[in-house]
Image (spheres, rainbow, N blue to C red):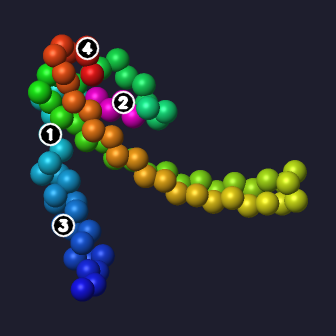
Amino acid sequence: MNLSCTTLCPFLLLFSSLVSSQYTPIINSNRPGFTQGAFSVGPGVYQLEFGASYRQDRFASLADEKSTGAGFTLDLRTGLILQNLN
């Protein structure tokens, strides 16, 4: 079964808008290596963070070698006992 992008993309956009919610007025992301925030999630709160990256490099000093890569990260954050214990 082959799902086309015209079928899958609207579903993903609708689904992501339904599940993105947080009790604070701003979403506090803190993906290691990408952002650094002073906020943590509260006790009993779960936060799912997804990130994608793509890079393309060219090294003139290494006989004009080329390097490309893609990566994805998925982080689950949850508050434990205290607000500042994450």
Q: Is residue 48 left or right of residue 37?
A: left
Q: Nearer the viewer, mark 2 or mark 4?
A: 4
Q: 18 and 51: which one is in front?
A: 51
- For mark 4, what is the residue? 84
Q: Earlier in the sequence, mark 1 or mark 4?
A: 1
- For mark 1, what is the residue? 21
Tag 4: amino acid: Asn
Q: How far is mark 1 from mark 4, CA to CA?
A: 20 Å
Q: Are marks 1 and 3 in contact (CB under 8 Å)?
A: no
Q: Which residue is found at the position 75% from the left and 56% from the top?
A: 58
Q: Earlier in the sequence, mark 2 or mark 1?
A: 1
Q: Secondary structure at mark 3?
A: helix
| Residue 27 appears anywhere in the view | no
Q: How far is mark 2 from mark 4, CA to CA?
A: 13 Å
Is 42 a magenta residue? no
Q: Which residue is found at the position 85% from the left and 54% from the top?
A: 62
